[in-house]
Image: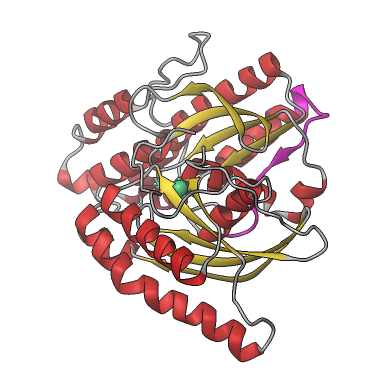
Amino acid sequence: MAEIQRELMIDSDKPFRVLGIETSCDETSLAVLECSGDDVKLLHHEIASQIPVHAVYGGVVPEVAARLHVAEILALIDRVKEKFVSEGTVLDAFDGLAVTKGPGLATALRVGVETARTLAFAEAKPIVGVNHLEGHIASLWLNETNRASWKFPALILLVSGGHTEIVLMRDFGVYEIVGRTRDDAAGEAFDKTAALMGLGYPGGPAIASYAEQGKAAAFSLPRPMLHDGSFDFSFSGLKTAVRNVWENFTDEQQRSSSLIADLCASVQEAIVDVLATKTIHAIHKYEPSMVGIAGGVSANKRLQERIAERCALEIPDVRVLEPARGLHTDNAAMIAAAGYWHLRKGQIDDWHILDADPNFEL
Ligand code: KG4
Ligand code: ZN
């Protein structure tokens, strides 16, 4: 994955500090991760969310996202340096850099990548461009309990706002995508159906919260490709089905909180049903030693429950891992962790040519 490979001698006895930078979508985030072998400590983490700004537009506006990243990122870097220098713990705040290279919004990614390249040059530190989706996988590894029982091959359901994939991870940095969405991502299905009901952005947390009071069987919604034998997904039809249901109600009925709760519970169940069923089928086929769910949608309690329940019944020997607390949605800690996987193997990019890649494949 790295454009140029050079030798990086990481002394295993000396902790190695990675500065992680994430700007692929609507969070500007910075983290300092101290790593020593498989022992990692999150020394510093900041996430500046742009969600309140984008919520006004009902979704992420790429140009606005990029401007906000520019406005925020140097202040975050200043705080990292101030913190470590004022504590007197280190002369330099970090030993290497990891930045999200893609996938994501081109203009937003570029802010992080250009900032990281400049730091790599100015501080003469090794840098690696990280795949955002690998970052989500690394969010599982940041959980100490998960790390202690980490095993390969791992099967990971990766569910974010832009991606839905079932990934077989054979080693750090070795991935096979065994299923993916053919149209919308699961997060997008949550976001688009929430927008239709006027529940704001992002839709996932809103739908999950209304769903707690609703009946999941209230509306019968499609579960496309559920039994087609593949591990692929399709969520775009769900949006149309929800629109058809929603538009059959009058304006007054649409204001009823019990209708909203029932429709949210039904939408959530349809999405979760497909995700959980396909994941279980993939587990039976690939027989992984470990299973994980990662990405923003993995914060969904119903999804966690459904996968855990079925695994407990059908494959009790396999543990289902979730990201470390608070690291389900986008953050720089996971980017620093994935970057460390590469840096410790000597996989370094050349800062002269490192570039954002909005369509970067895992
Ligand atoms: O991974 P993430 O932060 O960003 C991307 O890489 O896309 O995921 C954001 C997505 C959004 O679509 C959001 O609606 C969804 O994660 N999400 C949820 C929940 N929390 C966030 N979806 C369902 N239930 C949740 N509790
Ligand atoms: Zn993400």
Report the side of 130 relative to 267 (left or right). right
Q: Residue at x 78, y 66 (%)?
A: 14
Q: Residue at x 28, y 26 (%)?
A: 241
Can residue 217 be seen here?
no
The stretch of residues the image draws in magenta is 313-327
Report the side of 296 relative to 346 (left or right). left
Task: Look at the picture and state if 294 lies above or below 327.
Answer: above
Instruction: Tell me where residue 8 appears, x and y as whole percent.
Output: 65, 53
Q: How many marks?
A: 0
- Residue that lies at the very extreme toward the front in this rendered image: 6
Frontmost residue, 283 versus 78? 78
Q: Residue at x 35, y 57 (%)?
A: 26
Frontmost residue, 220 versus 146? 146
Report the side of 336 relative to 162 (left or right). right
Instruction: Tell me where residue 53 appears, x and y as whole percent.
Output: 26, 65
Look at the magenta stretch and give its main secondary structure: loop
Q: Is residue 325 magenta?
A: yes
Instruction: Tell me where residue 22 appears, x and y as whole percent.
Output: 45, 58
Instruction: Tell me where residue 114 appears, x and y as whole percent.
Output: 35, 60
Task: Look at the picture and state if 83 lies above or below 43.
Answer: below
Frontmost residue, 21 versus 288? 21
Q: Residue at x 51, y 12 (%)?
A: 230
Can residue 91 be seen here?
yes
